[in-house]
Amino acid sequence: MTNRRDFLWQSGGGLGGIALSSLLGGEAQGGGFLQEAHHRPKAKRVIQLFMAGAASHLDLFDYKPELVKRHGEKSDFGEHVEAFQNGLGPWKKPVWDFAPHGACGKLLGETVSPLGEVVNDMAFIHNMTGKTGVHSQATYLQATGFDRPGFPGMGSWVSYGLGSLNDNLPTFVVLPDHRGYASNGPKNWASAFLPTVHQGTIIRPGTSEPITHLFPHESAKYLTPQAEKDAGSLLGKLNRKYAEQRSGDSRLEARIQSYELAARMQLAAPEALDLSGEPDYIKSMYGLSSDGKKWPKEINWKEEADAFGRKCLSARRLLERGVKFVQIWSGNDNGFPRRNWDSHEDIEREHGPLSRGMAIGTAALIKDLKQRGMLEDTVILWTTEFGRMPSTQGSKGRDHNPHVFTNWLAGGGVRGGVTHGESDEWGYKPADRKNPTQVYDIHATILHLLGIDHEKLVFRKDSIDRRLTDVHGKVIQEILA
C-alpha cells in the first residue's frame, strides 16, 4: 500500500502527473475548520475593494452642506487636533458637486456618479472610526483586524473557516494595484499563524504573467518531461524525509498542497483569466474600452478604468469558478504624482482618475453579478484605511483623518439603499461619538452573512483563542436584509 501523494509522485512525475490525477478525479482542497455553518448563510463569496492611501469620504460619499457654507473660513474643531502633517487650514468644500441618485436619493460626488446606477443595492456606513493615522498600521487594521503585523487577513480566516469551493483555483485570491503593492504588501493577505495554505494567492490580470512562475520561463528548454519527472521524484523524497523528522509541521502539508494546486491551476487559471471571450458590451461596461473625452487630458481616468475594470471582470470570472474570497486593491505605495488615494497635495488631481475608474468598474461588477443571479449570494465590501480632513492641506489637498470615514457593502444579505451611522456636521468625527462603527463590526457582519458566528471562528495560538474580531465586534443588524 502507498499513500496518495507517494502514488502521485511515483506514477505521475511532478506537476504534470498531479494535474493528470486531478483530471481523473483528485480530491478537493477540503473543508474548513467549521464542519457546518453556525446559521443559514446569506452569502457564500466575498469581494473586498480596498482603496489604499485613504479615500476622502467628504468628496465621494458623505456630503456635508456645512463645508460648502463655510468654505474658506478658518477651521475650528472645538478641540485640540493633532494633524498628521499640516492639514488644519480653512474648511474645504467637496471638490465635486453632489447629486441624488437612485430611488433612495443617495447623494454621490460627481466623480463616482456611475455608482448611481447601483446605489439602491448599496448600504453606506458613514461613522467608521479607526485607531491610527499611520498608513501601515491602519491598513493592517482594516485588512486583518489588528494594527500590527503577524495576523491573518480576512480572506485567510474565511478560507480557514469554510474551506474551498473548487479543486482547481485558490480559495483566496488577491488582485493588487497594477503599479505595485500598498502599505505592508503581501503581509496584508498573509495567513500568519493559520496554516499556510490559507494565504492569498496573487494574480495580476492583464499582464504577461498573471500568476508568477506558474509556468516555466520560455528560456528553460532543459525542463523536459523526463526532467520534470526526475525533479518531482527527488522533491517527493525530500518532503517525506522532512515530514519524518518534523511531525506536526503544517508547512510541509501546505507546500505539498501548493504544488498540487499549482498543477491544477496550470489547467484552470489561463481559462479563468482569459477575457477575450467576453462580449464587447461586457468589456465596455467594465471600462475596458472607455473613451476619456469627458475629462481634461491631464486627468487620465481611462487608464484607471481599464485597470480596475479588468480586475473586477477577472474577479467575477474567478467567483464563477469557485473562488470564495477576492481582494481587489486600488492604489500603490510609491510614485509621484501620487497613484494612490493619499491626496495631501491635490484631491482633484489624485482622486479624480482613481475614483472615476473605480466607480465604472465597481458599478459594472454589481450589475454583472446581479444579471447573473450571483449578487444575491456574493457580499461586496468597499473600504479604505481611514478618511481625510474637512480642512485643507495646502490649498488643494486633505490630511489624514482616522476619526471617521466611510465603508459600504452590497450584495448577499445586505439591505440596499440605506445609510447607517452619521459623521458630524464637518465629517470630522462620528456624530454619536459613543457608538461608532469599527472594523470589528464590519468583519463580524461579513462572517455573519457567510453563516459564521465571529466569536466561534477561532485558532489557538500561544494559549490564546485568536479570532478575526479579537475581543470586539457586533453584527450591524440595521443593514441586513
Image (cartoon, helix red, strand yellow):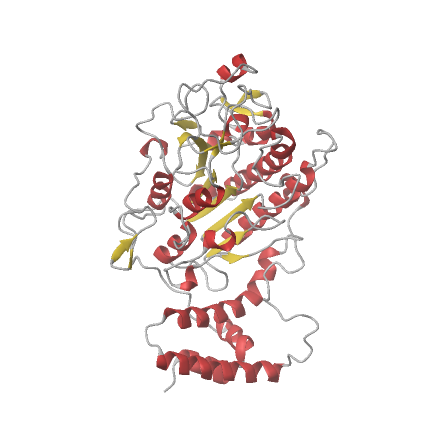
Residue that appears at 46% across and 84% down = 237
Q: Position of residue 94 (x, y in %)?
A: 56, 22
Left or right side of 454 for 202: right
Left or right side of 216 for 480: left
Task: Report the quarter where the N terminus lies.
Answer: bottom left
Q: Nearer the viewer, residue 376 or 310?
A: 310
Q: Quadrant of residue 115?
A: top right
Farthest left residue? 463
Callout count: 0
Q: Position of residue 104 (x, y in %)?
A: 46, 23
Residue that appears at 31% across and 38% down = 475
Q: Position of residue 118 (x, y in %)?
A: 52, 32
Q: Position of residue 258 (x, y in %)?
A: 48, 68
Farthest bottom residue? 1
Task: Report the quarter where the C terminus lies.
Answer: top left
Q: Residue 287: in sight, yes or no? A: no
Left or right side of 131 for 343: right
Q: Quadrant of residue 6?
A: bottom left
Residue that appears at 46% across and 64% down = 167
Rendered position, 45 above or below 70: below
Q: Nearer the viewer, residue 476 or 1?
A: 476
